[in-house]
Each structure stands twice: as structure tokens, then as C-alpha cells.
């Protein structure tokens, strides 16, 4: 089922857009944060919990599902929706990000990427055609083109060659794409160079995808300013009427800055990963529930939060669960952290409607970073 | 809040009883299976899920909560109910079972038991008074007397001495018990000897507890027949009008045999422990979802089961979650397994009402053990 994306309003002072699309009889709004369900499960959570916290699109991972349980099993189950019992929209990544982190540079050829299966050490080859074929079978609603995701440290020359190959891969993937109910997104790369981002975006747009992703922005080593430039250098050359998705972005401030530069969709494993380590997002910054000061704190993580966790449990209890290695603790924090990012996008949408997104950002920054604000 | 237990019907052909009690404005029926929430959480599950599957009393563990987070923190949180947000009845064990498994025989004295804290190696002393004091602070609805739980291999002479000490401990614990809202149960020991069980039961009843537990039946080494004898040798000497609880019993057939011998309450970690290992109860015996034959089994664990898991997910999906080490798999199987044992007690109650419990047992055995029935 293809999403029929419409822009409802553009913010006056920024490039932010408030949009919506229909899926399965339900209206979903953008900007949107998409929880990640790597192995066909958003870690610790049920589909009902995910929907209750206001989630729309969720992500799943082509590489992981290819290896386990295998795309044919998911296909015979009736596709990812039926397999995991989620009736909201599902997006799959291309598997590229995982594969490149397992491959050596010498394993990358025109054909595709050779790498070792992280579960059993077998040699595997992932090609643009294979990635699309797997995603076709998984039957997600949005598939990603197979792209090279070069490290932040890659040289200008390498990046240029890589973009050109990624463009040829995008073309091959588009040719291989057979699932008529599935949208296919192209991916813009180019590091922090405007001319490379421009080239990548312009040439990818010529292939006419259903939407566009911005890759290479979630790498570890860039400065925030570089990341934000990469957002801008990409959206600038993308058609207004199509969805734009910044891959792997989940820090609250990065979502706000992305929206300001015209991005609609974000995803990140951070809310569930932070949860497993005992961390919770709050308006006043992240807190670590392992900290001794929460031992007898019988208040919720945030008294303004409308999530199940904050309505029912105290910091002291969640701290106890995390200390005792009880997975219900990770579950409660996952609910809170995902709801936090979804609430953030809800507030962002309101700020777009009242043309006050920059004021919203200032207010958010002061609360979130407190005394450190401006010093970071 | 004390439970006002009433027997609604006694089965004609067995010693089984159908009973009820009120708690917090709700009626609960016995025989009852009580899920275990060792560390103030029934592993992976929310309080709402526990209630949705028809649970009544849940268990929590005095030893574990004493060490972490500490009974004073739970008390300052408002007691266990508020701490873990469960408004159904809560039973706490005495900590004895855990402590005895950590102690050497030489560490047992008239005063109590010396043992090593399993978290940090510190030497600790648990006495009857201390166990009751902790449980008073945890503010469970039913507390257990501190008893010695001798190994199945203990000699008659040792057992007799142990029962006499346990009786002195029971007296001391009763003296120390200060929480007027909390019921206190005495514990019957005595291995598989009728005279010892009779002595233990008769003397414990003289101390006039709110209910009685049957200990020493969940040990590893006895035969099923011995276990069932120990049930009978205990209930025979217990007052009819009070609740009887067989500690640590959770095999379906053992619950049925316990009820037949007049037991009302059962608990066991088995449904959640089996879940973590990928096992599910079914009418036709336990199944192991790790088995390759479930790879493409797109049917629920049991099509007759009314649990959330069976209504929404297939064996193939749950197998995938277990294989991929995703805790949502253990959560789904915990829901199913606990619901299975609760359903079993619901069917047992119906069989008591129609005086057909022995027929129910025959039918259960044939389904559950199939060809192996009679050979075990």
C-alpha cells in the first residue's frame, strides 16, 4: 500500500514541513520519529504498546531478517505485517549499513559487497538486486535502495566514486523492484560536501524514487554542525512533494535541527538501547536511573509525561528493576523513551503550525542542556 | 487487608474444595495458581498483563527484596503494592528456601541461619523475627513463617529435630508479627513420613495461623507418589476452613493431584522460567519452540487458548524471537504459560462443581502424556 504524502503547512521561518499520509485507513503526520524493530520486534514491546505511544512507521532490518529467520519464512508468514502483527506502516532499511560495518574496503566491488555473516562466519554477498529482492519478500511498505555508507573519514575522491557507484546500484535496485505495493526510496550520500550532496541528490532524483533518504549523517565522528549541513545540502536538492528521511538520527536536538532543514522522518535505536542501560530522556536532559540518588525517588521519571511508565511507576521502582537486571525495567524505559521522541515530534508539528519552531528550539535547548547550553 | 476465605463446595469423590475470598472489592476463587514475581516483578510482564490473564495472588520473595532494594525502601514506597503497582493480593515467602540453599548445615542454629549474600558475599543472619519484620515492612497480604526446609535426603531423626526447631521458630515469628493487615501462614514440614507431617501440622495448628503452607514437597529428588503423599499427610491434619498452600508446585499434574488432596494454592517459577528457555505448555504436553519443526508453523501455540499470545502470534514468530534472543519472546511465552496454569485451575474449579475432578484428571493425563501415559 503506497503512502499518499501531502504537505499541510510549511513553516515561515525555516524549511520545516508539517505533512500527512494515509495508511490502512489511518492518517499519520510528519515530522515523525520511527521506532526501530531490528529483528521484527521493537525490543521488549508489543505492537499494541507501540501504537498506544503514538508511533506510526516502524523500522525493520533487512540484514538481520535475511539471516534470521530468512525472508522466505517472513514471506510465507504473509509478510512482515502479519509475521510481527503490526498493522501500521513498516519501513525496511537496505541492509547496507550493517553489511558495510562487517566488510573490509577490499570487499566492495561493482557487483556488491562480500562480508561475513556475524552469526556463523559464512561468506555472503549482498547486491543491490538481492537487497531489493529481500525487501520485496519482507513486504514492508517502504524499501530502501542499497547504498554504500562510507565512513566519516572517507576522502572527497573516495566519496565521489562511492556516490557514482551508489547511483548505479540505485538504478539496478529500481530495475529489480517488483513489489507494486511497496514504495522505494533513493539515498543521498556525499559527506559534508555541498557539491557532492547536490550531485548525489540531483542524480538520484532523476531516477524518480517514491521518497529520499539522507545517509551518512549518523556517523560517529562528525560535528553537529557538519551533520546539520549535510541535512541542508541534501534537502535543498530534493523535490518538496516527497518524503525525506534522515537515517539513524534520534538525538532530540538533531531531530529538531533536521526538521528545521526540511527533514520529515527520523529513526534511531537510541530510545531502546538507552533503556537497556537504564537511561531515560527528560526535558531537562538524559538521566541515568542507576544513579544512587534515585534509590528513594518515589516520583515518575517526568510528571508531565503521558506515557504508561510515568503514569504507573516511580524512579525508585525502575531503578530497582534495572539494578536487578529485570527486563521489565528496559521495557518501561523503552516505552518512556520512545514516547518522549514521539511527543517531541508532536510538539514540533504544533510549532510548525504556529510558525514558532525556532522559539521552540531555543526553549528546548535551554531546558535540555541547562547551564551547559552554548558551551557544547 | 485480611482475606476472608470461604469454602463454596467440597468435591464428592476427592478432598478438593472450591473456595473464594475477597480482596480490595474483588472476589478471587480457589484452587488458584499464583505467578511468582521474585524481585517485585513477574519476569517480563506488566501488572495489567498479569491481571488480564486472570491471576489473583502473586508471590514475591523476601530474601531477594531484603537484599535489593531493601525492605525499608519498599516500605517507604508505600509497601509492595504501591512499589510494583499491583492492586491484587500479594504473598511473600519467608526467605527460608533461598537462605537454606546458600547455607551449610553447620550454619543452622537455634537463633537462625547464617549464610552468604549471593550478590556480594557478605555474611548475613536470618532469624524468624527478622523474616517477619522484613515481611511486615514489605506489607504483603500473606506472610510466611520462617521454617527450615531440609533436603529430600534428610534422615528421619534430622527431620524430627528440624520440625521441632521450626515450631519454635514459628512461635517466635508469630510473636514478632506486628502488621495487623497481613495474614501469617504456618508451615508444615515432615518429608514423606505421615507421623512427622501429622506432628508438624497438629503442633503448627495449635499456634493458630491464618492459613497453612505445605513445605518440602518441591524438592528435586522425590517420586511423584511421595509428593502426593506429603500433600495428603499434611492436609489431613489441617483445619478445613483455612487456606492450604503447596509451596513451589507448578507442574500441571501436580496441581491437579494437590487439589485432589485438599490443597488450595500453588506457586511456581516454572511458567516464566520455561518461557525464557523457549518452552510452552499445551494440553498435549510441553513443546520446545526451538525445535526446527516450528520454523514455518504459522499457527498459534494452541488454537483453543484465549491468551494474548495465542490470539496474536504464531509459533514461527515466537520461535524467531527466542532464536534471536529477543525478550519479547520470553514475554509472549510467559503470558501463555501462566495463562495455561490459570486456565487449568479454572477447569479444576468447574470439575469440582460438577464432582468430576477424577474424570478431569484422567482426561488431562491422556492428553498431556499421550502414549507415555501409565509408563511414567
Image: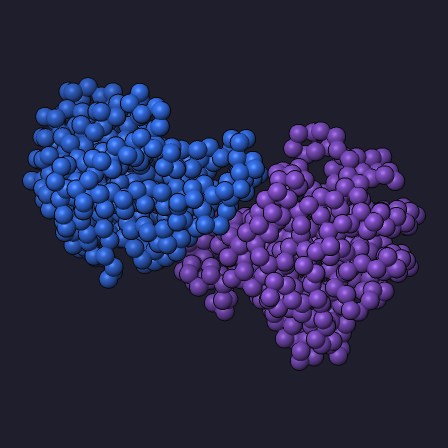
Chain colours: A blue, B purple
As rendered, which of B213 and B75 lies closer to the eye? B75
Query: Residue at the spot x=51%, y=62% of the render?
Result: B52
Q: Quadrant of the N terminus of chain A?
A: bottom left
Location of residue A190 with respect to A205 vertically, above or below = above
Location of residue B167 with respect to A24 vertically, above or below = above
User: Residue B77, percent across and down?
Assistant: 59, 44
User: Residue B270, percent across and down?
Assistant: 62, 53
As rendered, which of A215 and B314 lies closer to the eye? A215
Residue A195 appears in the rendering = yes
As rendered, which of B170 and B101 lies closer to the eye? B170
Q: Quadrant of residue A118?
A: top left
How many badges with numbers are in the image?
Answer: 0
User: Residue A88, percent across and down?
Assistant: 30, 55
Residue A162 appears in the rendering = no
Query: Residue at the spot x=67%, y=52% of the render?
Result: B140
Query: Residue at the spot x=80%, y=41% of the render?
Result: B127
Location of residue B106 with respect to B13 vertically, above or below = above
Specify whether A236 is left or right of A116.
left
Q: Quadrant of the C terminus of chain A?
A: top left
User: Residue B102, percent across and down?
Assistant: 74, 37
Specify whether A343 is left or right of B250.
left
Location of residue A14 with respect to A304 vertically, above or below = above
Q: Quadrant of residue A296?
A: top right
Query: Residue at the spot x=77%, y=60% of the render?
Result: B210
Specify whether A368 is left or right of B325.
left
Q: Quadrant of residue A3?
A: bottom left
Amino acid at each position: 500500500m503506497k503512502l499518499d504524502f501531502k504537505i499541510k503547512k510549511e513553516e515561515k521561518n525555516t524549511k520545516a514541513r508539517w505533512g500527512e499520509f494515509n495508511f490502512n485507513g489511518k492518517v499519520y503526520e510528519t515530522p515523525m520519529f520511527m521506532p526501530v524493530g531490528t529483528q521484527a520486534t521493537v525490543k521488549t514491546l508489543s505492537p499494541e504498546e507501540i501504537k498506544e505511544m503514538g508511533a506510526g512507521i516502524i523500522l525493520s532490518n533487512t540484514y538481520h531478517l535475511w539471516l534470521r529467520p530468512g525472508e522466505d519464512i517472513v514471506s510465507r508468514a504473509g509478510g512482515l505485517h502479519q509475521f510481527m502483527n503490526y498493522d501500521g506502516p513498516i519501513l525496511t532499511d537496505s541492509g547496507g549499513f550493517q553489511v558495510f560495518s562487517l566488510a573490509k574496503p577490499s570487499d566492495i566491488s561493482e557487483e556488491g559487497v562480500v562480508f561475513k555473516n556475524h552469526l556463523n562466519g559464512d561468506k555472503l554477498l549482498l547486491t543491490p538486486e538481492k537487497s531489493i529482492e529481500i525487501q520485496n519478500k519482507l513486504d514492508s511498505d517502504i524499501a530502501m535502495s542499497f547504498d554504500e555508507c562510507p565512513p566519516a573519514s572517507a576522502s572527497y575522491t573516495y566519496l565521489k566514486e562511492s556516490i557514482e557507484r551508489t547511483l548505479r546500484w540505485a538504478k539496478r535496485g529500481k530495475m529489480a523492484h517488483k513489489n507494486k505495493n511497496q514504495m522505494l526510496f533513493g539515498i543521498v550520500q556525499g559527506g559534508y560536501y555541498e557539491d557532492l550532496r547536490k550531485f548525489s541528490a540531483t542524480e538520484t532524483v532523476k531516477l524518480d524514487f517514491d521518497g529520499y533518504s539522507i545517509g551518512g549523517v549518523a556517523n560517529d565522528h562528525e560535528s553537529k554542525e557538519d551533520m546539520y549541513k549535510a541535512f541542508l545540502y541534501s534537502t535543498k536538492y530534493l523535490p518538496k512533494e516527497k518524503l525525506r528521511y534522515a537515517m539513524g538520527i534520534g538525538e532530540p536536538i538533531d531531530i529538531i535541527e533536521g526538521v528545521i532543514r526540511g527533514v520529515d522522518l527520523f529513526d534511531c535505536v537510541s530510545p531502546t538501547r538507552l533503556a537497556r542501560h537504564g537511561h531515560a530522556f527528560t526535558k531537562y536532559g538524559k538521566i541515568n536511573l542507576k544513579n544512587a540518588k534515585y534509590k528513594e525517588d518515589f516520583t515518575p521519571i517526568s510528571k508531565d509525561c503521558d506515557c504508561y511508565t510515568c503514569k504507573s511507576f516511580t524512579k525508585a521502582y525502575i531503578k530497582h528493576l534495572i539494578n536487578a537486571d529485570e527486563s521489565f525495567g528496559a521495557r518501561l524505559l523503552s516505552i518512556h523513551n520512545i514516547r518522549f521522541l514521539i511527543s517531541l515530534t508532536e510538539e514540533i508539528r504544533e510549532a510548525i503550525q504556529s510558525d514558532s519552531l525556532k522559539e521552540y528550539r531555543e526553549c528546548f535547548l535551554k531546558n535540555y542542556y541547562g547551564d551547559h547550553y552554548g558551551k557544547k
